[in-house]
Image: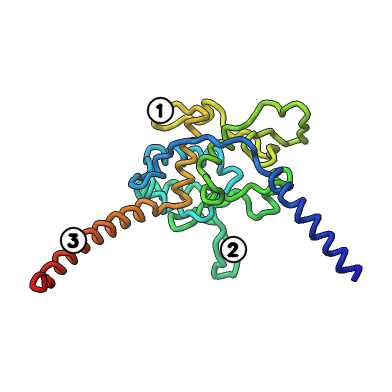
Amino acid sequence: MMKIRKLFSVFIVLAFLSPVASHAAKSTEELPNIPWGFQKVFSTYDRPALQRGFQVYKEVCAGCHGLDKVAYRNLSGLGYNPDEIKAIAAEYTVIDGPNDEGEMFERAAVPADRFVSPFPNDNAARASNGGALPPDLSLIIKARTNGPNYLFGLLTGYAEEAPAGEELLDGQYWNKYFPGHKISMAPPLSDGLITYSDGTEATVEMATRDVVEFLAWASEPTMEARKQMGVKVLLFLFFLSVLLYIVKRRVWRDVH
């Protein structure tokens, strides 16, 4: 009986503390409200922005964050031709095998390979990042409610110093949009850090918009095909409804 009472007491305490802890873990800052073009009903991705965003990912994010659910051949959706995709893939090395001698070997990546991870395993990733595991970015936009605005806020929400009364450990930074505000990732972007191949000025806001567009595409590269199919289905249903109405009128005209 005493054990049951103790368990019940623990349950009551956890029931009251859980909402408080959950609320404390969330950021109280209202996220930016960016009108992303790809979120509109009949919209498509911005191809120049996708290519700039891929450049940001490649030059800044790929050093710590993988993209393991995307293959190099998928880059055709960004407007790259097969030769360009082969050249991009060949910049990376993958472990393959076993060969005829039963040994693993290294080779240049090919378009069919998925994006090469920056680390061989999670332990190596943590060891290189002060114990923190950098998340894979393949589905980062889908992983959170209002993902595009959250990621935009996260990348632009760093403060030079923590507010009065707040202490940061070594390797921590203050970010007003990150849950708990204390983040182990250093500010990844700065004005002029990227030199865009198309000549666009790479401010922090522009680079952030571009990489969010790219990661939105990475999380749903078939979005445009899905929307096109949706339009076709709606048109088909519309004309089918008109046809059925005409047939109904013809069938029942003698009755009326």
> Looking at the image, how many numbered discs can be counted on the residues?
3
Rendered view: 243 above or below 213: below
Circle 1: residue type = Gly
State left or right for residue 47 relative to residue 235: right
The residue identified by callout 3 is 242
Quarter that holds the N terminus: bottom right
C-alpha distance separating marks 1 and 3: 51 Å
Q: Circle 3 sits in a helix, a strand or a loop, which is it? A: helix
Given residues 247 and 191, the one toward you in this image is 247
Quadrant assignment for the C terminus: bottom left
> Residue shown at 76%/31% (left/top)?
166
Question: Which is nearer the eye, 162 or 15?
Answer: 15
Q: Earlier in the sequence, mark 1 or mark 3?
A: 1
Q: Which residue is mark 1?
A: 199
> Identity of the amino acid at label 2?
Met
**Mark pair 1, 2: CA separation:** 42 Å
Q: How is the image coloured?
A: rainbow
Residue receiving disc 2 = 104
Q: Could you tell me the amino acid type at mark 3?
A: Val
